């Protein structure tokens, strides 16, 4: 379809340019013909003016030599429509009457020369013939233009054949294996130079991907091993006889352990571009759990928490992914509010985390979701919102921010169930 569209556009360009040039040429031809005709009448009148002036100087009655030119002694002898036209335009020398007659006028020192040139207007008599000739010429030009367009297409196809081959090499290569050693099959021209540059770029990309894959593989092993060890230790510890305080600490460690395991799985899935499981979960229990997990951040602060989430509300994002998003956003709100309110709202499929803190500085609001971007008062590494943003992109969630000196609000427009 694209090739056909390109071919149609090329033909249209050739035809359009040809039509434009032909019409311009026709217009110039008519303009030239009328100009030459007017110039001829002016030359004839000048010649007759010299002859009439000579007769006047000899005291003879002037008699023009050409039948269509007459000598008038006074302006009052002019036809009425010419006198009326001269009142509006005193310098006019050409006049057309309502009976389709055409006049040329020349002023003398004594008298006027008036030429009625209706029968001498050659261009007017042959203009239909000229027009028909130009139409035939236009048709011939269009045929030639179309032939040239098809010839150009054939030539372009031949010249771009190596580029098509290069496109096929890149397009047919599997995602997990970028093409290699393909530039040698191209000659040393512009396309060959592009092929070599592309091959070098793909080699660097492949090396980068290999390093990232190796890092992700090693990180996956190194992170999961201590998590598994601590999980086993916590399981054994739960089986021991513990007092209430110890039991509470163990439960808190178990919850943090589960959250860390979920976070690691989500982050590794993001790194490996794996599909993240998006099952439907109840939203209210998950919000309450995330608030409890982050509650240690507000133990010494005067912060009230409001939850405006319907008890039956569900969301198809998956518990692990949503838990990571909410933990980051709620924890971020708790960290940046010393006194005020943090509110979690859910309505019309939009989940909002709103706080009454000091807001995000205006100079970093546009880059707040970039890695390493944080305010001066932040004690974190500036990675949390970047991870949340990437995760929202993967889950088809639209994440937006409204922030001012009265506080900040993160809005997550979730996909419909």
Image (cartoon, rainbow, N blue to C red):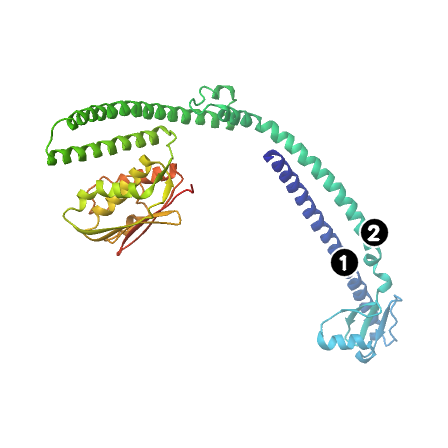
Left or right of 365? Residue 130 is right
Q: Quadrant of the rendered structure where residue 211 is? A: top left
Task: Say left or right for 25 vs 318.
Answer: right
Q: Position of residue 182 (x, y in %)?
A: 48, 20
User: Rounded to the nearest whole Å, what is the CA distance between mark 2 and mark 1?
Assistant: 15 Å
Quadrant for the C terminus, please: top left
Q: Quadrant of residue 289?
A: top left
Q: Pointer 1: residues within 10 angstroms few (<14), some, or many (20+)?
A: some
Q: Nearer the viewer, mark 2 or mark 1?
A: 2
Q: Quadrant of the N terminus?
A: top right
Residue pictured at 64% horizontal, 33% vertical: 152
How packed is label 2: few (under 14 Cα within 10 Å), some, or many (20 or more)?
Answer: few
**In the drawing, does residue 158 fall left or right of residue 217?**
right
Label 2 SS: helix
Give the SS element for disc 1.
helix
Which residue is disc 1 drawn over? 34
| Residue 301 spot, x, y in % from top left | 16, 50
Percent across and percent down for residue 302 are: 17, 52
User: Could you say where residue 388 lies in the image, as x and y percent from the top left?
Assistant: 31, 40
Q: Which residue is mark 2?
A: 129
Say which residue appears at 47% left-offset and 28% top-offset.
194
Above or below, 364 against 207 in this view is below
Residue that appears at 38% across and 35% down: 279
């Amino acid at each position: 379809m694209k090739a056909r569209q390109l071919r149609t556009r090329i033909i249209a360009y050739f035809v359009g340019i040809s039509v434009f040039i032909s019409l311009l040429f026709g217009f110039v031809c008519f303009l030239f013909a009328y100009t030459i005709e007017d110039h001829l009448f002016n030359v004839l009148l000048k010649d007759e003016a010299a002859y009439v002036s000579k007769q006047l100087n000899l005291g003879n009655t002037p008699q023009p030599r050409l039948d269509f030119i007459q000598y008038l002694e006074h302006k009052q002898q002019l036809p009425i429509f010419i006198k009326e036209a001269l009142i509006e335009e005193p310098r006019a020398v050409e006049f057309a009457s309502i009976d389709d007659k055409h006049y040329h006028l020349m002023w003398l020192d004594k008298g006027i020369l008036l030429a009625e040139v209706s029968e001498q207007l050659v261009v007017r008599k042959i203009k239909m013939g000229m027009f028909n000739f130009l139409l035939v010429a236009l048709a011939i030009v269009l045929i030639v233009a179309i032939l040239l367009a098809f010839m150009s297409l054939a030539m372009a196809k031949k010249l771009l054949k190596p580029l098509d081959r290069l496109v096929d090499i890149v397009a047919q290569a599997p995602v997990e294996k970028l093409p290699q050693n393909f530039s040698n099959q191209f000659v040393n021209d512009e396309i060959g130079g592009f092929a070599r540059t592309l091959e070098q770029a793909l080699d660097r990309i492949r090396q980068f991907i290999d390093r990232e894959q190796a890092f992700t593989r090693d990180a996956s092993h190194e992170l999961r091993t201590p998590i598994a060890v601590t999980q086993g230790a916590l399981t054994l510890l739960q089986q021991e006889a513990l007092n209430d305080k110890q039991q509470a600490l163990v439960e808190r460690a178990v919850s943090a352990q589960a959250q860390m395991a979920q976070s690691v799985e989500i982050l590794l899935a993001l790194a490996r571009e794996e599909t993240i499981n998006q099952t439907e979960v109840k939203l209210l229990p998950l919000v309450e759990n995330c608030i409890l997990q982050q509650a240690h951040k507000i133990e010494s602060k005067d912060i009230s928490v409001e939850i405006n989430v319907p008890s039956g509300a569900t969301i198809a994002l998956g518990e692990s992914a949503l838990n990571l998003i909410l933990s980051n956003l709620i924890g971020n709100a708790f960290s940046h509010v010393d006194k005020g309110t943090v509110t979690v709202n859910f309505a019309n499929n939009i989940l909002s985390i709103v706080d009454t803190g000091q807001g995000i500085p205006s100079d970093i609001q546009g880059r707040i979701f970039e890695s390493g971007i944080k305010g001066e008062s932040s004690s974190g590494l500036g990675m949390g919102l970047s991870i949340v943003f990437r995760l929202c992109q993967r889950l088809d969630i639209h994440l937006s921010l409204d922030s001012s000196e009265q506080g900040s609000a993160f809005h997550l427009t979730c996909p419909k169930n």
